């Protein structure tokens, strides 16, 4: 992933140095376990740990791989250069490359998941704060982009909180599912390595042994992991789209913070564009782009092929780095977002009283008017408001059919804004707890 959309801590997980350090730890812990089982001499296992403070030379490993055409062999050759060829002769005994590659990949994914969990927790804190701040800030709800009925800005933030809280649960589940390791040897039968070696290595790396790994860890786990990233990305876009709509000039109910010295356009100095949320929409597409390849990686030939390998070398870093950046960016947007309550009320009253149509419809049916007749009575008056920007309540009061069923006082009561916000506390209790 390009530096523009990267954060250092997540990038570090996917660096060659980190990868080779994990490979080393897998091999060293495996040697310890084999020594405990009496399979290899203890002194040879201890000798491997002489490299525990070594910073592996990536360029040297690449140089060896240029000859061997095999990355794990290149690493093992370089490790022997530090440990000594005689001391290192039992390294990788009974193991196969996938034992190292797959276990390492899952270590990296679990570390990435930990950062993403922390990102989601930060975002949830920002959403909760803004929801509480604007619990009673009334705005118009929209369906199909058209005015529907009143809601509050707090409920808007609260529904995004609930969605991201579900994503936090999904991310934790995905982390648990991916936190497996395999040290089972060729085709996964443990023919040349004791299963207790796998147990020891996994324990040392914070993983659990894969119940059956053929020669690779089953890729349905990875498909579920990347699918979770895709769902979270879609939720990011869901929030970003709402903010982008709110920032439109003719809406302007909310906006991204515009910092001192910021420029919106190279041509038009007046512009304040929702660039961060537009960027988030684009980044969400890139995270979701990893989902289908991850799904297609599930189907491998027999006990193993490497058609998944090139895919994962790209989507592992790119999807996690991008999502980490996007979650952090969204948290910043929510934290500093500008809210304009006066504009919310002005927008709601653009067609005076029109958004109360359902209350009038229900009142008429309760007064004994058939639903079909009540709907026609309300709609004909609503259409006058659409066409002529008149006041809906005044139109109703001038309609003899309406006033035959409802008194002026009953009509007036149907325009009480508080009617639509009376259950906000109940919804908040459901979302945030009592």
Image: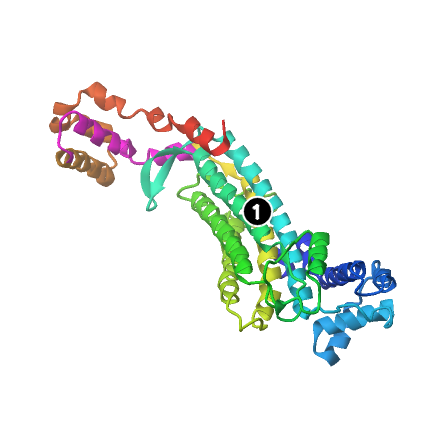
| Residue situated furthest top in the rendering | 409
Q: Magenta stretch mostly in which secondary structure?
A: helix
In front here: 224 or 287? 224
Residue annotated with mark 1? 172
In front here: 389 or 431? 431
Left or right: residue 26 compared with residue 133: right
- Residue 63 on image: x %, y %: 77, 76
In front here: 299 or 120? 299
Left or right: residue 375 compared with residue 319: left
Q: How many marks?
A: 1
| Residue situated furthest bottom in the rendering | 67
Can residue 267 be seen at all in this image of the molecule?
Answer: no
Name the image quarter holding residue 40. bottom right
Q: Which residues are magenta?
A: 342-371
356 in magenta: yes
Left or right: residue 27 compared with residue 151: right
Name the image quarter holding residue 312. bottom right
């Amino acid at each position: 992933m390009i530096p523009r959309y990267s954060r250092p801590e997540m990038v570090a997980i996917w660096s060659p140095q980190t990868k080779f350090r994990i490979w080393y730890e897998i091999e060293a812990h495996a040697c310890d376990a084999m020594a405990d089982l009496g399979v290899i001499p203890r002194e040879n296992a201890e000798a491997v740990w002489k490299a525990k403070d070594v910073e592996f030379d990536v360029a040297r490993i690449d140089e060896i791989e240029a000859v061997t055409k095999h990355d794990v062999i290149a690493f093992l050759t370089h490790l022997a250069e530090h440990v000594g060829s005689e001391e290192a002769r039992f390294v990788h005994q009974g193991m196969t490359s996938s034992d190292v590659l797959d276990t390492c990949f899952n270590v990296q994914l679990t570390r990435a998941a930990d950062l993403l969990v922390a990102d989601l927790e930060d975002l949830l804190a920002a959403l909760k704060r803004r929801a509480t701040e604007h619990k009673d800030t009334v705005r118009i709800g929209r369906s199909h982009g058209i005015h529907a009925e009143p809601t509050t800005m707090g409920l808007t933030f609260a529904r995004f909180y609930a969605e991201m809280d579900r994503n936090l649960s999904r991310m934790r589940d995905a982390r648990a599912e991916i936190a497996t390791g395999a040290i089972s040897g060729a085709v996964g039968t443990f023919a040349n390595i004791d299963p207790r070696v796998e147990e020891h290595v996994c324990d040392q790396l914070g993983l659990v042994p894969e119940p059956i790994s053929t020669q690779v860890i089953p890729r349905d786990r990875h498909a579920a992991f990347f699918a979770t990233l895709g769902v979270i990305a879609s939720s990011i876009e869901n929030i970003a789209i709402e903010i982008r709509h709110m920032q439109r000039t003719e809406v302007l109910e909310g906006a991204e913070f515009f910092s001192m010295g910021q420029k919106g356009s190279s041509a038009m100095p007046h512009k304040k564009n929702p660039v961060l949320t537009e960027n988030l929409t684009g980044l969400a597409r890139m995270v979701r782009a990893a989902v289908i390849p991850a799904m297609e990686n599930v189907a491998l030939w027999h006990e193993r092929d490497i058609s998944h390998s090139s895919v994962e070398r790209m989507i592992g870093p790119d999807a996690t780095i991008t999502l980490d950046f996007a979650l952090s960016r969204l948290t910043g947007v929510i934290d500093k977002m500008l809210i304009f309550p006066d504009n919310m009320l002005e927008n709601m009253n653009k067609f005076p009283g029109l958004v109360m149509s359902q209350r009038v419809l229900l009142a008429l049916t309760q007064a004994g008017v058939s639903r079909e007749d009540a709907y026609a009575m309300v709609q004909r008056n609503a259409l006058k408001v659409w066409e002529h920007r008149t006041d809906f309540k005044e139109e109703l009061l001038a309609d003899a059919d309406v006033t035959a069923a409802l008194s002026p006082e009953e009509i007036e009561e149907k325009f009480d804004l508080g009617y639509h916000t009376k259950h906000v506390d109940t919804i908040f209790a459901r979302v945030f707890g009592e």
